[in-house]
Image (tube, grey):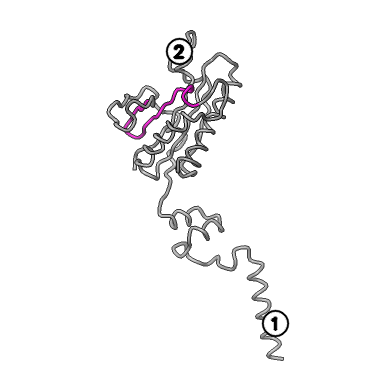
Amino acid sequence: MKTYKLLLCVGVGVMAACNDPKGGLENDSLSDATADTAVMYDDERGRVEADGAEIKDVGEDFWAGVNWDAPVVNDDPELKGSDIEMRQEKEYNIYTLDDKLLFDTDKSQIRTEGEEKLQQIANELKDLPQNGQIRVFGHADARAGNEYNKELSAERANAVKDWLQNQGGIAADRLSIEAMGETAPRATNETARGRQLNRRVAIVAVTRE
């Protein structure tokens, strides 16, 4: 009888562990967790401790306050002659590409020439603090309707974000997008040159530690 009770207790214990979606390890300390187990637990803090890097959330007010007229940087040897405009503020860099360098008209598929430009930017991003957020802003001119412009700028921003992640080696949790549409023009929409300046993609990377 005693043997039967012992076996019954052991069986119940095994069943309880099997029914525990966390494998009965819920009392393990975060310091013992690996990145894999942290993902299994959906525990972001555990993942951060396991990976050793925490992406710092700067908040939406930060992105809303980006100064598109920040000073231009002309002395970066890696970008010289690249057609990539770099602007810089104390806490972030802005890398801007004319849409014709990246896309065909009304398209969101990145051209081969555009990939070369994005690789140059990806190389720059890898030299920045790796816990800094990066946001890709899509901009359009005002020729089409606002809804269409916003949709196209979102598709283009997403294409650039995906390229930076999949081909550029930039961590996915650092990247986000914002579709600006026609809301932040750099020049008048009354001239062809002005509209060309307004059709662009800007990559803003946080540089503060």
Q: Nearer the viewer, residue 100 or 39?
A: 100
Q: Is residue 74 left or right of residue 204?
A: left
Q: Residue at x 29, y 25 (%)?
A: 74
Q: Quadrant of the N terminus?
A: bottom right
> Residue tagged by mark 2?
194
> How far across and how far down the image is residue 95, in percent?
40, 29
Instruction: Say which mark, if any, is on residue 8.
Output: 1
Q: SS at mark 1?
A: helix
> How far across and how far down the image is residue 174, in percent?
46, 42
Amino acid residing under circle 1: Leu
Instruction: Say which mark, if any, is on residue 59.
Output: none
Q: Which dot, 2 or 1, sits closer to the camera?
A: 2
Q: Residue at x 49, y 30 (%)?
A: 112
Q: Residue at x 39, y 45 (%)?
A: 130
> How far across and how far down the image is residue 3, in percent?
68, 90
Amino acid residing under circle 2: Gly
Majority secondary structure of magenta residues: strand
The verdict on residue 93 being magenta is: yes
Q: SS at mark 2?
A: helix
Is 1 rendered above or below residue 185?
below
Is 2 rendered above or below residue 142?
below
Residue at the limit of the structure toward the top, as seen here: 190
User: Which stretch appears magenta?
Assistant: 85-102
